[in-house]
Amino acid sequence: MAFEPQTDAASTSGTPGGPPALAITDLVKQYPTGTQALKGVSLHIPEGAFFGLLGPNGAGKSTLIHCTTGLAGPTSGSIEVFGHDAVQHYAEARKAVGLAPQDLNLDHFLTLEETLDFHGGYFGMNKKARKERAAELLDAFSLSGKRNDRANTLSGGMKRRLILARALMHRPRFLILDEPTAGVDVELRLELWHYVQRINQEGTTILLTTHYLEEAEQLCDRVAFINGGEIVAEGTSADLAKQYGVGSLEDAYLELVGRKELSRASLGEDIA
Ligand code: ADP
């Protein structure tokens, strides 16, 4: 069956009462241009959670992810991944994280197998483990037939699957999905939903950013709204709807971005 999860239960099951997958405290990020992208963000994601981070473009989502994965340095505040400081103990913290970035940042001249193999090598996996894991993931993502093809020959949907396989290569305990379903067709979106839900159920903690509110509602047990570099609300979808005095996560989001006139509840009223 396609998308059979291939996590290692031993590596994903945590210690009860152990450190959270992600603990961000008072994080400030100011870019050299002067833009303060994060203005004192605190966020806790317990192990095993499926957590959604939602906000409009420019809210600070990518900056938060980049600071967590060492692609950007925090100006102040702290970030811990399973208790490892993301700056002081970068290697341990980074090893625990699998990142499926929004941009399809594949090396187009590598084959699919090489893409996974190089990634595994970067994370210190030995040759045998890399070979086995790559074969397992290519199979799980229905990419085995393309293993010797170059990444630039793949369709957009296949590239998305390869990006996710690459993120999972070193068996991370914490998976960050940055808009994983942007621009994919309905079938692949649903396949990806099933897949990530299964690996979450097997113990992998997930942080998802998405612009699809129904995706967050369907998958996430908790959601935070970020706006202007600040976390402005956090809770279950139902909590957020209640907090904004509306009936759905989407309507809560529209309140957040000041566009409540776009609510689906009022669709059709304009022509009535
Ligand atoms: P999101 O991912 O929610 O769209 P970002 O984290 O990309 O938001 O951006 C947050 C803010 O930081 C925006 O104002 C953006 O223009 C700015 N920004 C992002 N990256 C950089 C950078 N490398 N240099 C300067 N400003 C940046």
Image: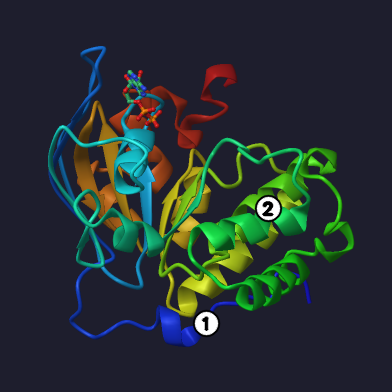
Residue 112: image location, x then y, percent: 76, 54
Amino acid bearing label 1: Asp
- Residue at 53% x, 70% y: name it: 125
Disc 1 and disc 2: Cα gap in Å?
Answer: 21 Å
* First of labels 1, 2 by sequence position: 1
* Number of other residues with Cα within 10 Å of mark 1, as a class: few under 14, some 14 to 19, many 20 or more: some
- Quadrant where the C terminus lies? top right
Residue corresponding to mark 2: 115
Residue corresponding to mark 1: 8
Q: Relative to residue 245, is residue 5 depicted above or below?
A: below
Amino acid bearing label 2: Thr
Q: Looking at the image, is mark 1 or mark 2 nearer the viewer? A: 2
Q: Relative to residue 202, is residue 43 depicted above or below?
A: above
In the image, is 254 to the left or to the right of 155?
left
Q: Toward the viewer: 73 or 91? A: 91
Asked whether the viewer can see residue 185, the reply is no
Residue 132: image location, x then y, percent: 69, 77
Residue labelled 1 has its Cβ within 8 Å of some atom of ligand 1: no
Asked whether the viewer can see residue 262, the reply is yes
In the image, is 33 to the left or to the right of 176?
left
In the image, is 150 to the left or to the right of 200?
right
**Number of marks in the rendered image:** 2
Q: Relative to residue 40, is residue 112 depicted above or below?
A: below
- Residue at 23% x, 85% y: name it: 16
